Image (cartoon, helix red, strand yellow):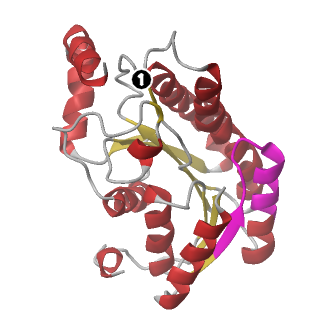
Amino acid sequence: MDTYRKLFIPARPQRVILITGGTSGIGHAAALMFAALGDCVAVTGRRAERLVDLQREAEAADLPGAILAIEADVTDPAAMQRAVDRTVSKFERLDVVVANAGIGHRGPLVEARWSDLETVLRTNIDGVIHTVRAAVPAMRSAGGGHIVLVSSILGPVPGAYAGAYSASKAATDALARSLRGELKADHIRVTVLWVGQAHTEFADKRLGQPGRVATRWPTMSPEQVAGSIERALERKPRTMTVRWIDRLFIWAGGQFPALMDRLLARVYG
């Protein structure tokens, strides 16, 4: 917990935060960070035993905030509505949503199993939509808030053999841009966080061909990404990239698209 307490956080009211995909990796780290900062955190995930472990971990650390573990699948709109309702019932409002749940896929698009591609699209696109649609009415009632959509550097720079995943993250970026205009009058901000390779279960759980791909590209800790989520809530940018090397990746993708296409085809192929 000392990692989180080193963050410089100005004095502010306690927030109520809903995080999806909180059973491991970035979501797990973010839940503990916000609880360490004194916030009330509702965490959703599909693995009930992992949620219990998270709650026990927070209680054992005697964190100043609170964690409410909610078993829910982001692909189920009714489950996400129940998660929001439970959050508001427990903490009386909802201020922040971190749409973090996601799954990857590697492999040629044409030969991939449709069930794998559908899982990626339903989780990464539908899951964001269901989360936002359930949460926004509660945030309006609270007078505003902030939505952080955890995306990937493969959204602005799509990669060969990562077509479904890249498309799902590009869709996330498009949803964020639309939502900014729709929710501005409600005082609800929307930030896209572009994340590079993080040292989590994500690569091992990837559908198609699991395992880390770009072995020469450095990974970062989930705690580092969690810290960037907090900075996004402070600074309220439209987009944010965690590391300078990932900003360079996105810049190169825009300036030298053909070169990046060839490079990513070699890396992911």
Q: Amino acid at mark 1?
A: Ala
Q: Position of residue 42 (x, y in %)?
A: 64, 68
Q: Can I make out residue 37 in this image?
A: no
Q: Position of residue 124 (x, y in %)?
A: 58, 36
Number of numbered markers: 1
Residue 86, placed above or below residue 82: below
State the SS at label 1: loop
Q: Which residues are magenta?
A: 68-85
* Residue position for label 1: 162
Nearer the observer, 209 or 165: 209
Q: Residue at x 31, y 82 (%)?
A: 2
Category of crowding for the residue at label 1, using alpha-carbon neighbours closer than 10 angstroms: few (below 14), some (14–19), many (at least 20):
many
Examine the image and state in which quarter residue 235 appears: bottom left
Q: Residue furthest left?
A: 216
Q: Residue at x 81, y 62 (%)?
A: 85
Q: Position of residue 249 (x, y in %)?
A: 23, 30
Q: Quadrant of the C terminus?
A: top left
Examine the image and state in which quarter residue 193 appears: top left
Examine the image and state in which quarter residue 138 appears: bottom right
Q: Quadrant of the N terminus?
A: bottom left
Apparent side of residue 53 relative to residue 228 in the rendered image (left or right): right
Q: Residue at x 41, y 54 (%)?
A: 232
Magenta stretch contains residue 205: no
Nearer the observer, 25 or 68: 25
Magenta stretch contains residue 69: yes
Q: Position of residue 73 (x, y in %)?
A: 71, 50
